[in-house]
Image (tube, rainbow, N blue to C red):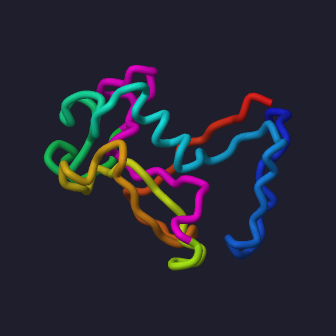
Amino acid sequence: MVGKTECYAIANESENTVYNKEANGFRLLTDAEWQYACKAGTAGYRYAAIGQVAWYQDNANGTVHEVGQLLPNPWGLFDMIGNVWEWCWDLYDRQRYGDYRVFRGGSWAEVENSCGSTARRKSMPDFKIDDLGFRIARSAV
């Protein structure tokens, strides 16, 4: 729709989906890219107090919230922590978990300790739940 080359050749099974690293279209962040973007040059588990930057179990009233209502990280990215977990491209640990993929950051349904820059979980890519979403990126090629 926007004249970019698709990054993925999507197959029925996630293990057969191919990522074209030369493409200039939209894609999921890698696990490392996600953490780098989340931390935004900061050193801690969070870039500010949790109530200032994240929707989580204690302040979300049991639901997801529109992006951008809380403070962004130092690079201007909103809701990197909390609100919804975010899928990443990477497999979690192929040898042990097969095709489970990484998701990061925590969600509105999580306790405070589960929402941070190193919070990381896994599931099969066809897993669906109301506190799991994604963030897109585009490589500068």
Residue shown at 53% from the left, 50% from the top? 31
**Residue 8 colored magenta?**
no
Q: Nearer the viewer, residue 135 or 66?
A: 135
Q: In this view, does 5 lie to the left or right of 118?
A: right
Residue shown at 76% from the left, 71% from the top? 16
| Magenta residues, dominant SS class | loop
Q: Nearer the viewer, residue 136 or 68?
A: 136
Looking at the picture, does residue 55 appear above or below residue 15? above
- Quadrant in the picture for the N terminus: top right
- Quadrant in the picture for the C terminus: top right
**Residue 90 colored magenta?**
yes
Res. 76 image quadrant: top left
Looking at the picture, does residue 131 appear above or below residue 75? below
Q: Nearer the viewer, residue 42 or 20?
A: 42
Q: In this view, does 82 lie to the left or right of 38?
A: left
Q: Provide the residue span drawn in magenta.
A: 66-93
Relative image position of residue 128 (x, y in whole percent): 48, 67
The single residue placed furthest to the left in the displayed view is 58
Res. 17 image quadrant: bottom right
Relative image position of residue 89 (x, y in whole percent): 61, 55
Numbered marks: total: 0
Res. 71 image quadrant: top left
Residue shown at 70% from the left, 41% from the top? 26
Residue shown at 43% from the left, 56% from the top? 132
